[in-house]
Image (tube, rainbow, N blue to C red):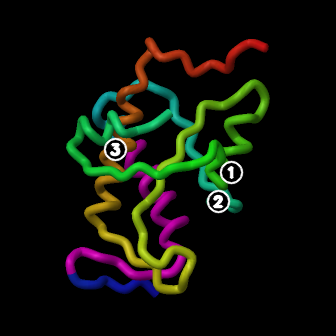
């Protein structure tokens, strides 16, 4: 059961996965509408857990850095190593109480994620080579 809260917030279980799929689809639609030319393969995976900060600045969205030790603890770790490498990006959705029955998100943050990802996708032009390195 989803529940709308005050101040444009939403409460539900599984928001991290559900919103991830929603954000990917909406960002891809928005990038296409804006004339984005890159091919996009999007994935939502079951074992979940390039930077986009320039895209966030371009659309005036505040963002936070998340420190990592080289692994994201998401399926992106395996995907980017498959074959000779697959260009992969990870975006964290700001949530409260993640992996609990009552996860809470701000719809403003959700829209911000859509805007940043769409800007990032529009910034991938034909001058950017995403082919795996030979080796």
Q: From mark 1 to mark 2, how far is it between C-alphas?
A: 6 Å
Left or right side of 46 for 19: left
Q: Distance between the residues labelled 3 and 2?
A: 21 Å
Q: Residues within 10 Å of mark 1 (few under 14, many from 20)?
A: some
66 sits to left or right of 61: right
Q: Name the residue under label 2.
A: 48
Could you tell me which residue is drawn at 36 percent across and 27 percent down?
123
Who is closer to the viewer here, 23 or 77?
77
Q: Name the residue under label 3.
A: 116
Task: Judge whether 23 appears above or below 33 on screen.
Answer: below
Q: Do residues under tags 1 and 2 come within 8 Å of each other at their CB atoms?
A: yes
| Disc assigned to residue 25 | none
Q: For the point 34% across and 44% down, which residue is it?
A: 116
Q: What element carries label 3?
A: helix
Of labels 3 and 2, earlier in sequence is 2
Q: Residues within 10 Å of mark 3 (few under 14, many from 20)?
A: many
- The overriding secondary structure of the stretch rendered in magenta is helix
Question: In what element is the residue under mark 1?
Answer: loop
Return the x and y of residue 87 as percentages of the image width and height.
Answer: 60, 31
User: What span is colored magenta in the figure?
Assistant: 7-29
Q: In which quarter of the image is residue 132?
A: top right
The mark that comes first in sequence, 3 or 1, is 1
Disc number for residue 75: 1
Q: Which badge, 1 or 2, is on the more N-terminal residue?
A: 2
């Amino acid at each position: 059961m989803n529940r709308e809260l005050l101040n444009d917030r939403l409460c539900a279980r599984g928001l991290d996965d559900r919103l991830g799929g929603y954000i990917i689809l909406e960002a891809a639609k928005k990038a296409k509408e804006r004339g984005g030319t890159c091919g996009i393969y999007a994935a939502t995976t079951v074992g979940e857990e390039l930077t986009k900060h320039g895209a966030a600045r371009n659309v005036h969205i505040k963002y936070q850095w998340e420190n990592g030790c080289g692994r994201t603890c998401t399926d992106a770790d395996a995907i980017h190593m498959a074959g000779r490498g697959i260009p992969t990006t990870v975006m964290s959705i700001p949530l409260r109480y993640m992996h609990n029955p009552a996860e809470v998100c701000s719809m403003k943050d959700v829209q911000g994620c859509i805007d940043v990802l769409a800007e990032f996708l529009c910034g991938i032009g034909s001058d950017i080579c995403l082919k795996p390195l030979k080796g």
